[in-house]
Amino acid sequence: MLTPTSPDPTGGRGAPQCASRLFGSVVWVCVVVSVLGGCELRRVPDGPWRLRALTTPSASSHAPAAAAWPRVYSLDAAALTRAKQRIESGDAQLQPAYDRLVQEAGAALKLPVASVMDKQRIPPSGDKHDYVSMGPYWWPNPTKPRGLPYVRRDGERNPEIRVDYDAPRLAAVTGAVTTLALAYYFTDDEKYARRAALLLRAWFLDPATRMNPHLRYGQRIPGVTEGRAAGIIETRGLVGVVDAIGMLERSPSWTAADDRGMAGWLSAYLGWLRSSALGKQERGAHNNHGTWYDAQVAALALFTGDTVLARSTLASARTRRIGAQITADGRQPYELARTRSLAYSAMNLEGLCRLAELARHVGVDLWSYRSPRGGGSIRKALDYLAPYADPRRKWPGRQITPTEPDLLVLPLEQARLVYRDARYDALLRQIPEEAVRSHRAQLLYPEPDSTMALPRTGS
């Protein structure tokens, strides 16, 4: 259960017999699996590589791995376990969310295998393994020949971003992998793990198709630049991929070589995030970009066993993100300045909640942190947004595009468990019932005990 104290050289697949890597003084151990009598290298929850028996542990063994699965960081393993047990016991309250997950996983099974090599566009480097995307809010300048340089129209997405760029494919892959892994966890159906593994190998591991672990050419602006720090927001799905890999660990479709390969790729990308000029620039962003940069760094650091980096990143988020971004009354000024201010406020709040969940693993409490200078906190930000879960309430800021009725379901469900405040239950009842009951948040953050849902209004 959640408690306050407790939304691109390069990752090649290693040989099945052994693996080695150096990153932040973390060393991989070389082993020959066949000599070790039925053992293989797997990462366990504290990060380092260890030997784990392939056979089922005997009744006399301690079997810590069984209790620790799924190995997740931005989700709550205990909550997932609780949801799985309730589904297996036939709990009707979670059935709509479970049914929707299975339906979405069925669609994800049909997603074509994709890679950066699918594009016809040639990156400036000449290497198609490099990721390329375009800034979404940039449009041809009607007063200039050939429209160059492009000009910004905040909140207005240029459909050109979907034409032979990598961003839509990466988003589809990471979204599908997250859905498939969750479906595998809840159903134990190997077809979901098999497809998730295939998608991950094509995008990240296969030497013929893998993406190079950097975003030098992310969110280019025609006529202005071939790559920007802002493009790093497009890999925020990796936070979910890290958890997905943890859910796939027990599948025979996900091998030790796959795990090592992903650890190598993610280590290399983490190194680029921290050392490159674009990564350092994104770290300095004051808005949702900075929040999601930290979420990526912390998640990848935890996955690769660098708890020192994870802890320092998450500890600094108290002042760098929460204190600097949220006012005493819960407003997020950097997001409110946007033309889609409600959507961006919710997006940044989601990132902050991800940071709070990641922080639990290193003993940092972000859920209850309150800035001593400005008084801002995650809870204040949520409380500012929460009344607008009611579709009858008009958002006072600019929001030039429609929002979905379930926009605030996830943070409200999290807050309901974290803060134990009945106000959040009441606010959830203002959202159309189907949008709440079928939301994935029901599976991620279920009540400790099955209870009857109260009647909702606003449907």
Image (tube, grey):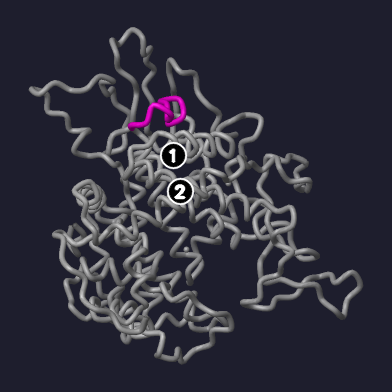
The C terminus sits in image quarter: bottom left
Residue 207, placed above or below residue 433: above
The image quadrant that residue 320 belongs to is: bottom left
Left or right of residue 132, residue 379 in this image: left
Q: Is residue 195 magenta?
A: no
Which of the two labelled residues, at mark 2 and mark 1, occupies the earlier sequence position? 2
Left or right of residue 244, residue 144 in this image: right
Left or right of residue 322, residue 370 in this image: left
Residue 443, placed above or below residue 125: below
Say the numbered circle drawn on residue 192: 1
Give the residue at the far right of this rendering. 145
The image quadrant that residue 61 belongs to is: top left
Image location of residue 242, percent across then percent down: 41, 45
Marks 2 and 1, how far apart at CA: 7 Å
**Three-letter code for the amino acid on which mark 2 is drawn:** Ala
As helix, strand or loop, the secondary structure at mark 2 comes to helix
> Can I make out residue 296 in this image?
yes
> Can I make out residue 362 in this image?
no
Say the numbered circle drawn on residue 105: 2
User: Mainly helix, strand or loop, the magenta region?
Assistant: loop
Give the residue at the far top of this rendering. 35
Between 364 and 316, the one lying in front of the other is: 364
Between 161 and 322, the one lying in front of the other is: 161
**Three-letter code for the amino acid on which mark 1 is drawn:** Tyr
The magenta-colored residue range is 250-259
